[in-house]
Image: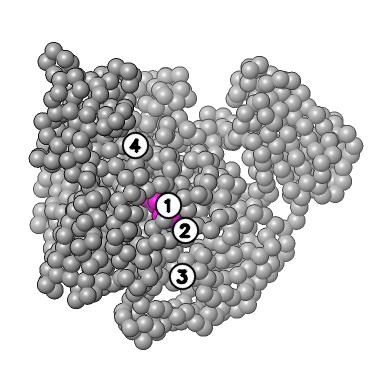
Amino acid sequence: MPVSATGLPGFRNPALPLRERVEDLLSRLTTDERLAMLHQYAPAVRRLGVGAFRTGSEGLHGVSWLGEATVFPQAVGLGASWDEELVREVGEAVSTELRAFHYHRPTAVGSDRGPNSLQAWAPVLNLLRDPRWGRNEEGYSEDPVHTAKVGEAFCRGLSGDHPVYLRTAPVLKHFLAYNNEDDRCTTSSALRPRVLQEYDLAAFRPVVAAGAATGAMAAYNLVNGRPCHVSPLIEAELRRWAGPTGHELFVVSDAEAPSNLVDPEHYFDDHAQGHAAALKAGIDSFTDHGEDTETVVGRLREALERGLIDQEDVDRAVRRQLEVRFRLGEFDPELDPYAGTGPEVIDSPEHRALARRAAAESTVLLKNNGLLPLDPARTPRIAVIGPLADTLFEDWYSGTLPYRVSAAAGLGAALGAHGGEVVHVEGSDRITLRSRTTGELLGKSAFEVTDWGGGASTLRDADTGRYLSLQDDDTLAPGQEIIKSWFVKETFRIEPAGPDTVLLRSVFTGRYATVDPTDGRVGVTAETAQEAEHWQREVVRDGVAEARAAAAAADVAVVVLGNHPLINGRETEDRADIALPEGQEKLLRAVAGVRPDTALVVMSSYPYALDWADEHLPAVVWTSHGGQETGHALAAVLLGGAEPSGRLAQTWYRGDDPLPAPLDYDVIKAGWTYQYHRSTPLYPFGHGLSYTQFTHRDLRLSQPSIAQDGSVGLAVTLENTGARPGSEVVQVYVRALEARYEAPRLRLADFRKVRLEPGESRELTFTLPAERFAHWSVATGEFTVDPGGYEVIVARSADHAVLTAPLTVTGEPAGPRAGTGHRILAVDFDDYEDAAIVDATRTDGDAVTPADPARPATLHFREVDLTGAAAIEVETAREGDGERDGEGGARLEVRADGRLLAEIDVPVTGDRYAWTSTTAGLAAPLGGVHDLSLTLRGGFRLAAFRFGAAG
């Protein structure tokens, strides 16, 4: 083994190139030591002086799960800031605190577990396609350009700016097309090539290509029928983009996902096969079975012994891990510039100030008819009302709040400085529940009841503030002061059962509360309503009446409504709809009925349908769960001390707008996001008002036309024409005119946030490469910029264009799709009906099958050159299950311009992955260009087809 001139082992010599150091250390490891490094908790190699290592510390908007740390706004809030520099600063603060936890807050489990990891599992780049997604709070935006720019900024903050060493190692989550929680481990996201390339991959591609990320995490779901943990896209896309950066990505699994490959996904027969396939697909570290390293390593050892993997597969993954560890300074503590980070940085004054600024800049003014900003001299008495008025919540990936400044507290402090007063009421009913069986009160006290939507309510003990909770022995008792656990046992459905009588049902188990008549024990054991205890419900305090009284006695009301991040929309649980909880809507209307000067503040992880509020209230504001400084930030915005400079990074739909099905990932055909949605939203992507006025003028393009591989410069002048300083987000969109494909209504190309003093103006310049006008051509399998007319649009939002300039792209137009003599993939259709995309094999390729074998599926291929075509060869697989085939067996029909060319009976191959080719002559030889359609009848798969001369 090489020893350097210093006498140190090669891997200990910082003067050697990184690759040499990695190879030297790898060469010194035994096979068992290398296998052990494939688990999340890699044990120490003490004979070499190599410490234990583990992957993953959560750092989405603050250091998570390790104790008190600065809590910044949720990612969806940071995205709403549209401020890349701010987001970079937040990433820097998070990584600095994570360094402090690494050195000074060791895990209590013991040294074998390894120190708190410097690999940061953040940011989340999954696009917010569906606002009902339970993890909506974790993403930045519904747009790939916006998400990539904000995500890259956060990564830059996490990794630091040293040329050699990383402060932390950012890992992008979750690859790929992950936007539903219900049955997330077994559902498949169908991505046709255009959606894959233009939408889902487009959020990850720029961040990886820029070298901003050091790793990625695979997603729980399947894509096109294949689990993401064995996706060929890990190597074909992710690692290909990283190639020019000089560093390979270190790809980790999500928790328990490798085991999911066998159960519940049943994709492989045994765990050795599943783990082997994941390793070969590019998974380098297995987050599985918690700290039980041996189970995972045993499976991989078995895979090695069975020849399912070889030593190079293992070495390749270990090599990637070691590279990250070297870059984190593990082997050069004396040279690591971040090694001296002390515990004083955790929740430091600087980070508190940054948290306040981030919360303020993330706040979005959705509507304002002049009520805001409030003038303390004219509104000295403010009623702050609602379930979120005087509390802050943690979400699953937030840190432990070191302190909480609620909306009521922040407004109280700010208004008090001007001699004003805040009156706070929650507006919730206080009730007692008395057993009809024993006459005893449940909990011996009254409960504050809060409606969180979807029929889920919490009951908080009026005396202790603790939530009524289902205990491990199925009894009920006031339990936690805060709700933050994987299994939420504090939500109940209060179901009417007669006059002033209700049943109490656990949301967690679905069972009803019962009372033992002999000892009065309250258990949650009844499976049906007939077995349940009847409770006499008495209203001790009418929350709505109390709120009305407070509002009537105030000069203005601020109603703070929204969600609890662990209830009704969270990891593992999607929302059923976007309606505001019924009880909260009722409270809002009651307050506005007596106090027209009512401002609604929505504090939420996701959009709501606020139709009534938008129509009837003078002011509506949104903030995410903004962290410990939320109240100070909100007070500053509401009272005019800070600008509401946030802009929505997600469309807020209307209540009567029928949203596509949650599992319809085809943003183009389904009509998702501002790019393709066909109805006017309530609040569009990019929307946000200001307290000042801005004028955009003098839009100029550097040239009227560009080549297909060129670029165009854009200049526009922004002026603050109002009386206050303020920030505007200049949004640049592009649109194709008369496109030959289904193009977006418009598409974000770039943006910049600018702060201007009153009367100040500034010229902003942008460079738009031709790729901003490109679409994925299914005919050629590459990005293409069609020649023709385009528009460049400067806008305040996706629905508020202010300046437009025409642009022409010159070049040769695309010809027809080559048909004769060319293999055409079935998935490369231009349009379809009733088709599903599935896996062609377990390792690679896509195929198409009817979504329902009882209904035919049709694929459309436009403008196909069939000159000389006399026969068609099709590649099909058919298990031969009569039930799947439906009536009439399995048949493929081929038409050109509606005329039947061929009918092919699809043979049984016995397996969905067993492929065969079948050739049939055409009804008549073809020439020229035609629109094709292929109709699939029955339960078979079509991978590709080819036209040729007659056999």
Pinpoint residue 681: horizontal percent, then vertical percent.
50, 57
Disc ID at residue 609: 1
- Front position among marks 3 and 2: 2
Q: Which residue is mark 2?
A: 682
- Front position among marks 2 and 4: 4
Q: Is residue 327 left or right of residue 580?
A: left
Q: Amino acid at mark 1?
A: Ala
Q: Amino acid at mark 3?
A: Arg
User: Can residue 832 be seen?
Assistant: yes
In-front residue for pair 276/879: 879
User: Can residue 359 be seen?
Assistant: no
Chain part drawn in magenta? 606-611
Image quadrant of residue 633? bottom left
Mark 4 to mark 1: distance in Å?
Answer: 17 Å
The crowd level at tag 2 (other Cα within 10 Å; few <14, some 14-19, many 20+) is some
The quarter in which the C terminus is drawn is top right
In-front residue for pair 649/162: 649
User: Which residue is depicted at the point 39% across and 73% down?
Assistant: 728
Image quadrant of residue 537? top left
Q: Which residue is mark 4?
A: 455
The answer to whether residue 499 is above or below residue 576 is: above
Mark 2 to mark 1: distance in Å?
Answer: 8 Å
Q: Which scheme is used to colour this image of the protein?
A: one colour
